[in-house]
Amino acid sequence: MELKVVKASVEKGEGLGWGKSLLVPNIQEILKNDSQSVPERYIQEPKDRPLISQNLFDSLQVPVIDFSMLAQKDANEIRKLDLACKEWGFFQIINHGVREEIMVNMKAAMAAFFELPFQEKSKCAKGANEIQGYGQNFVVSEKQKLDWCDMMFLKTFPHETRNFKFWPLTLPGFKEAVEEYSTEIRKVSNKIDANLSVLMGMDENGLKRKLGEFQQGIRMNYYPTCSRPDLVLGISPHSDGSLFTLLLQDDEINGLQIKHKEVWIDAKPIPNSLVVNIGDAIEILSNGMYKSIEHRAISNEKKPRMSIATFVMPGDEVQIGPLDSMVNEKHLPRSYRNIKYIDYIRQKFAMKMQGKAHTAIVKL
Ligand SMILES: O=C(O)CCC(=O)C(=O)O
Ligand SMILES: [Fe+2]
């Protein structure tokens, strides 16, 4: 007789993984039945609601970095990058070298996935202990307010982290578009990490030498239209746990907001650019010289908005902590403790996203 063995679910991408999340409804589906509906669970407390009125800080713009100048090692552009990381934690890059066609294909592949019938999308659904797949942001309590967003998260690098059970492989062109886009973004990310390495007092290979091969994950965020965008949030305020994140946003629709000097500022889209933000891991490695910044997304009444975030991260088992070059016990005392990356991420996901509250895990 064949013995049935119940495998402990610690296979690739299963088991405890990056955390445990409650499963919640799918906002795109709720709206298919009633496009005007704004269920109670999505209505934010008054203090957390976005101000949709005229942006009073219209003149403030996220810094723009010309990537072709960085490639030429232009001292002025490198200084601008350093300042953008210190004062904003966010910048938009132009002339990054990713061909427009590749970005257009990526957006089209994402749109095609979210247009699939729910039953089809559900074949890629993530489980409760899963980060990869189709679903929603991590949810840790039944009482927690929910984000007006459905998403699809896939790991793309290193190759062995790809788990095709979460990929819609029968959707024509999807796999190719994600792979091609991710490969191009990896090239941009390599240049960013080389520049950050130098700015943090090392040579261009400093971060790679310290951390080894980076992981890359792609999160496709789908924000349906909302009849009351003043009551809900597309994504609650948070900072990313990554080293840094590269975001491809809609060319026209505003949605991303950044907390800059205590005020929410729109990151107005520049067509074909990429928005880059510093994540918690660089904040820790730089001993706080570069800070991850709180950001959120708002929804709108007119058109669904899609954004594609690529997270560049250390490997799960890698220890992160302030770089030797960023610590000087006299002038720059160590402000963060060392932690294994996956332990940091698990603790982050175990809390409701609340701005930067989770970074207290590693503060000294
Ligand atoms: O949609 C956006 O503009 C922001 C997305 C985001 O912050 C994220 O995916 O971490
Ligand atoms: Fe984010």
Image: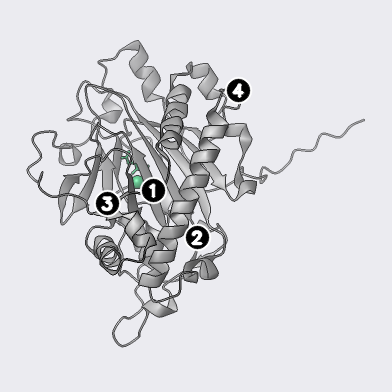
Q: What residue type is labelled 4?
A: Thr
Numbered-mark total: 4
Along the viewing direction, whichever of 10 and 229 lies nearer the viewer: 229
Label at residue 170: 4
Dot 2 or dot 4: first in sequence order is 4
Q: Position of residue 268 (x, y in %)?
A: 21, 41
Dot 1 or dot 4: first in sequence order is 4
Label 3, secondary structure: give it: loop
User: Which residue does the numbered mark 2 point to in the structure image?
Assistant: 341
Q: Position of residue 62 (x, y in %)?
A: 21, 51
Left or right of 14 on screen, residue 140: left
Dot 4 or dot 3: first in sequence order is 4
Q: Distance between the residues labelled 2 and 4?
A: 34 Å
Q: Distance between the residues labelled 1 and 3?
A: 15 Å
Q: Distance between the residues labelled 3 and 2?
A: 20 Å
Left or right of 31 on screen, residue 338: right
Label 3: how many residues lie within 10 Å, few (<14), some (14-19) or many (20+)?
Answer: many
